[in-house]
Image (cartoon, rainbow, N blue to C red):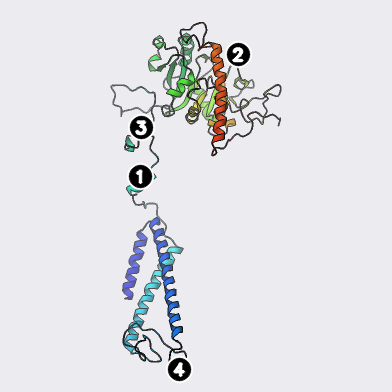
Amino acid sequence: MARIAADEAAAQRAHWDSSLPEVVERRRREDVASFREQNRLRRERRAAGQARMRSDDGAGPSGGRRSYFWCPVQGLETGDPSRKRFSGVVPPAAPLIFLALLCIAGAILWLDHNENLTILLLHPREVTADETPPPEEPSDICKNQRTPPAGSAALPRGIVQDKSNFEFEPLGRNPELKEDLPSKSLLAIPVGIKQKAVVDKLVSKFPEANFTLMLFHYDGAVEGWSDLPWSRRAVHVAAADQTKWWFGKRFLHPDLVAEYDYIFLWDEDIEVDNFDPLRYLDIVRKEGLEISQPALDRRSKIHHQLTARARRGGAVHRRFYKTAGGGRCYGNSTGPPCTGWVEMMVPVFSRAAWRCAWRMIQNDLVFAWGLDFKLGYCAQGDRTMNVGIVDSEYVFHRGIPTLGDAGDDKTVTAAASRSALRQRSSTEMLIFNRRWKEAVAEDDCWTDPYPEPPTATTKD
């Protein structure tokens, strides 16, 4: 019997040794629970036996305590035949030997089990690097999968492609035989035929190997660009009398531009004699700028001094200082227009920043006034560091009106005069600011990372 118990213990140890840590831990908890339950039952049986012995102490003829022990074998008792005990009587030797052997075998099994349990508790077996966990059950795999893109729950996951791009596909080529091309960025510009010469010069600065081109024709004159050498590689989108931000909201969804490193969303009246886009991106990456713009030549039409090219030189500046007059900016200023800000005419967004900014663009607020003061929230961190103006690569802003040109109502409806458009822009800024405040008040789970006023009022 002792050998059988030892064999069982050995088999149990072999089973534990082949189990993985998760199985060992689960078995260890089960063994501990079983061990504790057995102890509890032993204590209860011992307490019940002692209670019965105490109740029988005064039942003998002498009325005193008697020495006795329980015998599991029927017919060995003496005295009262209704009792299963000996009272001062020596039982036959054979039953005693049998009981002794039974107790020894049980003790050996119990000690071996207890020893293995102690080893597991004190020295859990380490898992080697070459061991692999068992494959998950299908139900577990499905539970751990991330939520599929909206609308694709009816499809197998491997067939779902939730992102796209604007790259042309040669019709006669095997689609699976693609060359490894360098990463690209996207240049998107709203254009009118009147600015054709300026746009041609601008686009020619952006190498085809590094940039995909997209033109938003707000006057509908698409055919007028077909004579330019780069026109056939551009994606042309036409919609009469619409703005850059109207086009951007509808045609630059983050999933459509997810393959592009940076999004250049520029106005058309920009001269680029002193601008190199590849050097610009090298600086942006080195400086860690998520939202940026090239500095404006000081001969440009400048609306905010932060965007003007710094006189001190250098590659980048992130703030400017104004110590007199209204709207002062000091070294401790933490927000627009002193720092963490770019203008909306030539912004450059990283992929992550655009994914955030696109969601903030309001579908019906097509001039996006007021949006520039909130772009810092999309800077993927500290806006005073991740938003900046690149001075070494700068542009000239001509400031030519396009939409609402009163001299030519062929490109815009007669009612949309310049004054009407400016009034619409101002109204949009009021609406956007109101919506922002309402959204902040309604969202109890959102914490403003920039609770201070946008412009500091005291000096360091």
Rendering coords of residue 56 (x, y %): 43, 86
Determine whether the residue tagged by mark 2 lies in a helix, strand or loop: loop
Determine whether the residue tagged by mark 4 lies in a helix, strand or loop: loop
Q: Nearer the viewer, mark 3 or mark 1?
A: 1
Identify residue for label 1: 142
Q: How many marks?
A: 4
Q: Nearer the viewer, mark 3 or mark 2?
A: 3
**Point 35% across, 86% down: residue:** 96
Give how far apart the Cα atoms at labels 3 and 2 are: 47 Å
Local crowd size for mark 3, using a 10 Å CA cut-off: few (<14), some (14–19), many (≥20): few
Give how far apart the Cα atoms at labels 4 and 3 are: 95 Å
Give how far apart the Cα atoms at labels 3 and 1 are: 19 Å
Identify residue for label 3: 161
Q: Amino acid at mark 3?
A: Gln
Q: Amino acid at mark 1?
A: Cys
Identify residue for label 4: 62
Residue 369 appears in the figure: no
Q: Nearer the viewer, residue 159 or 135?
A: 159
Relative placement, left or right, of 376 versus 323 is left
Give how far apart the Cα atoms at labels 4 and 2 are: 126 Å
Q: Quadrant of residue 52?
A: bottom left
Identify residue for label 2: 299
Is 4 situated above or below 263? below
Rendering coords of residue 194 (x, y %): 47, 8
Residue farthest bottom in this picture: 62
